[in-house]
Image: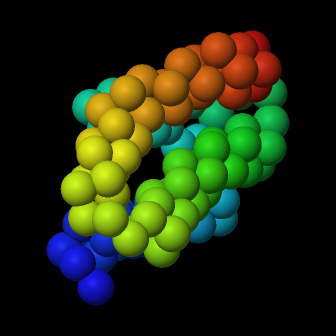
Amino acid sequence: MPLERGAAIIIGFAMICVSIYYYFSKKPVTIYNNSNPPGVDQITNVRSYNHATARLMLVYGAIFIFEGLVITNKLMCFFLVVLTVMPGIVVVMAIFESFILKKYLK
């Protein structure tokens, strides 16, 4: 297995591990590393909020795994992984801000 495909699969599994942690977390979580998540008193339903965030990260990780398993061309896999990381995280942030936070913040 080429390095590019393996890296895509490893990134995908890391995202899925993060999503599992988010799913079972009792306290509110966030996708941002440099900021604190909203407080329990700021969210309408912590469990549903965490589950929605976990589903978002699960889909993001599944996209990486799909790229690593399906795309056999090394160069194409590399470019798709880069495109998934760079603009992909912007899409994930937009979904998180526009849908998840708007739905669950008081």
Task: Name the residue rendered at 44%, 65% in the picture.
Answer: 71
35 vs 13: above or below = above
Residue that appears at 78% across and 20% down: 103
Give the image location of residue 58, x and y in percent.
Answer: 60, 56
> Which color scheme did the rendering employ for the protein?
rainbow
- In the picture provided, is 70 more to the left or to the right than 24? left
Please tell me which residue lies in front, 77 or 35. 77
Query: Quadrant location of residue 100?
Result: top right
The answer to whether residue 1 is above or below residue 97 is below
- Is residue 89 visible in this depiction of the protein? no
Q: Which residue is drawn at 52% across and 32% down?
A: 92
Regarding residue 24, the answer to whether it shows in the image is: yes
Quadrant of res 52: top right
The reply, left or right, for residue 60 in relation to residue 88 is right
Q: Position of residue 97 (x, y in %)?
A: 57, 18
Number of labels in the image equals 0
Residue 102, image x, y percentages: 71, 15
Which of these two is toward me, 62 or 76?
Answer: 76
Q: Is residue 12 left or right of residue 98?
A: left
Q: Residue at 54% of width from left, 64% of height from top?
A: 66
Q: Is residue 47 above or below residue 30?
A: below
> What residue occupies the far front of the structure in this picture?
73
Where's the N terminus, which quadrant? bottom left
Task: Find the residue positioned furthest to the bottom.
Answer: 1
**Image quarter (top left, top right, bottom left or bottom right) of the C terminus:** top right
Q: Position of residue 49 (x, y in %)?
A: 72, 39
